[in-house]
Image (spheres, rainbow, N blue to C red):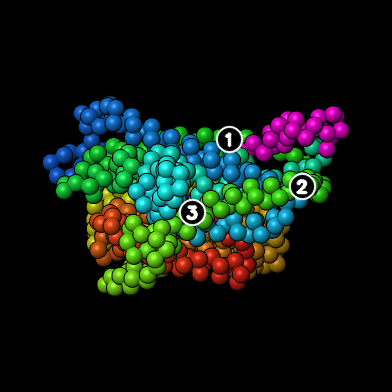
Amino acid sequence: MSLKESSDERTSRVIDQLREMGDPRWIPLYITLLFLVLFSSVVIALFVGSVVLGLGGNAGITFADVNELLLNREAAVLIGNTIAIGIGGGLIGTAMGAIYAWLTVRTDMPGSRLFKAIVVLPLSMPFIVKGIGWISVLSPQFGLLNRLTRSLFGFTLFNIYSMWGVILAIGVGGLPLAFLVIEPAIRSIDPALEEGSRIAGRGLISTFFRVTLPMLFPALFSSFMLLMIFGLGNFDYPFLLGAAQGGFDTLATEIFMVVFGSVVPDYTAAGIYSIVYVIIAFIAITIYWYSTRQTHKYQTISGGSRQTVHKLGKWKWAALGVCGFLWGISFIPPFGGMLLMSLSPGIGDITTLQFTLENYVALFDIPSLRSVIINTLLASLIAASLTAIFATFISYTSVKYDRFTGLGDYVSSIPLGFPPIVYGLAIFWLILLVPYVDSLYGTLAPIILALVFVRLPHGVRMITSNLIQISDDLDEASAISGATWGTTFQKITVPLVKGGVTNAWIYSFIGSMRELGAIVLLISAGNNVFTGLLLQMYNQDASALPTVAAGSVVLFLIILVFVLGYEFLGEGKYTAG
């Protein structure tokens, strides 16, 4: 037999390989690779456009540009502000979420079921809406609480236009996400370990710090890192509470200002700041990846023991007050301030208790409002559908293909390393550089693409947690019975992960309606959405704040309808972050 492969054998082998590549069972892998190519194209466009080509007479980024922008005190302050806001907001949100989750799960506090149900309610308010609410309550000039404390006690309670104001807004707003991350970990603690510690002579406090806290560390650290990454990339709060009135900027607001804050956009500066932004975010996400890969060190084996519920006695009412305060500060001040401002005759009349609907009349008199609402719903609908489709196939690649698990994990996680506002700049360069794509500028397509990138990592995690519970035996039994991969996927896999897909869709839909940072650089007259309209109204005329607040109430109510509809009519529980 010849050692060399004959021409017929080589042809047959190539045909077999092509047939295998054309097998429908590889569709999830191909769609995963398609998304990777799409994402890589955006990243390459950002690098080529910002670093190599540039616009106008500037031939890309040079070392002189880097030295001028980064090697100075102003750049250090920008970077320091960004990191401080991320860390501060992460610490506050994680602490609040841990206390809230512990009291509702491990104690006999009255009303715990109610507090578990309403913890997600603050998620119905977009960040720009919350920002308007915080301004209405804690503005040093006209904020409701500040005017009351000045009239009663002669001092200003808190200046929301400050670094601490931004940290407070991000921190207390992170309560729902922190709770959703930490609560399952608290629920899964094996009580036998704590009981063993008590039997060994340790007290309740010693047991908590020596046994319970180490087991909760992965969830606590994950919550902190997720909230910190969100704080690093947040645009809404730093712009409303910092750049617009507080006199300080972050990398996100500076990127916006160098593009829209001057007559001639400085895309070179925007590119440099974006690259620095990405480096900081990737360092944070790398730490997060590493920490979550080590969580096996904290695993416990449980036979389904019942959780130990601590009897608080007379202290249960204090616990109720603590939970009420934590939830209240995350929802009532921004919502109440927004609502009162929307009903006030003027920006300084919030404490006069004189109410009017004129602000809503002015809002609905805006000629473009109808098209803005349609754009918002349409972009959110398409983005949510694309996110759910991509997330389903990427999750399948991660869980069902042993050889490509790393690829699926990588593709689903890498978008987290890009702050939302950087996507806007990257997609701008993609449209500018790719032939025949420039016609998409001013349409909803760039906005939809940015929304998919931002929401996909979370959607993949929602579906993966569902898909990983499906045994391979079901696929094998279906194949043995003669079903094709397509039939198995359609009749068995999809129905079993329908809950995860639904969660991913509703999270992406509602999150897309709330998003501003990822799309703020892509908004134009023809593709404006609701959050962009609110930002433009506030940015053009600060005295229009009551009308902006009215718009915030309308947007909140639209989102609330979908949240409540999903809670009462859907098949799963809303778990957005």
Determine if residue 544 is in view: yes
Which sits earlier in the primary sequence, circle 1 or circle 3? 1
Which residue is painted at 60% across and 46% down in the image? 97
Q: Secondary structure at mark 1?
A: helix
Q: Amino acid at mark 3?
A: Pro
Q: Position of residue 39 (x, y in %)?
A: 39, 49
Q: Amino acid at mark 1?
A: Ser
Q: Position of residue 298 (x, y in %)?
A: 69, 36
Q: Position of residue 275 (x, y in %)?
A: 33, 38
Q: Secondary structure at mark 3?
A: helix
Relative height, residue 388 to residue 73 (above, below): below
Residue located beneath label 2 in the image: 314
Tag 1: Cα neighbours inside 10 Å, few (<14), some, or many (≥20)? some
Tag 2: Cα neighbours inside 10 Å, few (<14), some, or many (≥20)? few
Please state which of residues 286 and 358 is positioned toward the viewer in this rendering. Answer: 358
Q: Secondary structure at mark 2?
A: helix
Most extreme residue toward the right, as rendered?
A: 199
The magenta region covers 195-218
Which residue is painted at 58% across and 52% down in the image? 327
Kindly check if marks 1 and 2 are in contact, taking CB atoms under 8 A apart as contact: no
Which residue is painted at 33% across and 42% down in the image? 246
Residue located beneath label 1 in the image: 291
Q: How far apart, in angstroms, are the residues tagged by discs 1 and 3?
A: 35 Å
Q: Which quadrant of the rendered structure holds the N terminus?
A: top right
Relative height, residue 424 to residue 294 (above, below): below
Q: Position of residue 144 (x, y in %)?
A: 42, 53
Residue located beneath label 3 in the image: 333
